[in-house]
Image (cartoon, helix red, strand yellow):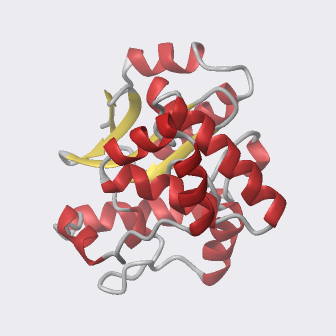
Amino acid sequence: MGHHDARIDDYIAGSAGFAQPILRQLREAVHATCPEVGESLKWGMPSFGYRGKILCSMAAFKQHASFGFWQGARVLGEDPAKPAKASPGARRAVERKGGEGMGQFGRLKQLSDLPDPHALAGFMMQAMKLIDDGVARPSGKVAATRAPLVVPDDLATALKAHAEARATFDRFPPGQQREYIDWITGAKRDDTRQRRLAQAIAWLGEGKPRNWKYMNC
């Protein structure tokens, strides 16, 4: 049988009002699908374990909550070596929820942002099966195959004009540099890109990484 950790109760109670029902419903869904699940706090966030392995986790931030599986890519069928068995309809439901934010379900701001209960249960069962089958999470060596880091022209020009921002950017490791680059180049509209560029320069000038808000939570 699974168990509840009182620290998770405290975490939920201390979260923003909008996040509390989201976290409670996610917690109930995890326990309903996986009666053996155990709870703990890892990296300051509620974590759910199954047979000694991390199954999934959730978190609350100032304006949104998040939920994700430890082997998210495989659970959602993004890893061709271990495709998920969830239905195409369930996959589309998750894809519509995608976007910025931790986990695989985007920024959760209200209960309606959660995936369909049956879809979520299907993903849970897939995540459990991966653990039952002894499938390990891919190692960090996969990151070595990523495309070379290329600084876009508009960001390079802005950095040249702001010495402090450029010093911070140059000091960051490639992963943190890429976070800024991907955020800026991921904008679909030119005005959005310009706003992100200006915000990036402001944050870099203050010595902040792209996801500094998450790091403070």
**Where does residue 26 sit, x and y in percent of width and height?**
57, 41
Q: Quadrant of the N terminus?
A: top left
Q: Percent from the top left, x then y, of residue 87? A: 58, 80
Specify the farthest residue to the bottom.
Answer: 80
The residue drawn where x is 34% and y is 75% is 148
Q: In the rendered image of this protein, does residue 79 appear above or below residue 172?
A: below
Q: Tell me: residue 181, above or below residue 48.
A: below
**Residue 68 seen from this side:** yes
Position of 148 with respect to 17 (left or right) is left
Q: Position of residue 196 (x, y in %)?
A: 69, 50
Q: Residue at x 20, y 48 (%)?
A: 51
- Going 61% across and 53% down the picture, which residue do you hit? 100
Q: Position of residue 108 (x, y in %)?
A: 68, 44
In this view, 156 is above or below 161: below
Q: Quadrant of residue 43?
A: top left
Q: Name the foreground residue: 125 vs 71.
A: 71
Quarter of the figure with residue 109: top right
Asked if residue 37 can be seen in this view, the reply is: no
What residue is rendered at 48% in x and 65% in y? 151
Which of these two is toward me, 63 or 135? 63
Displayed quadrant of residue 185: bottom right
> Is 100 on the left or on the right of 131, as rendered?
right
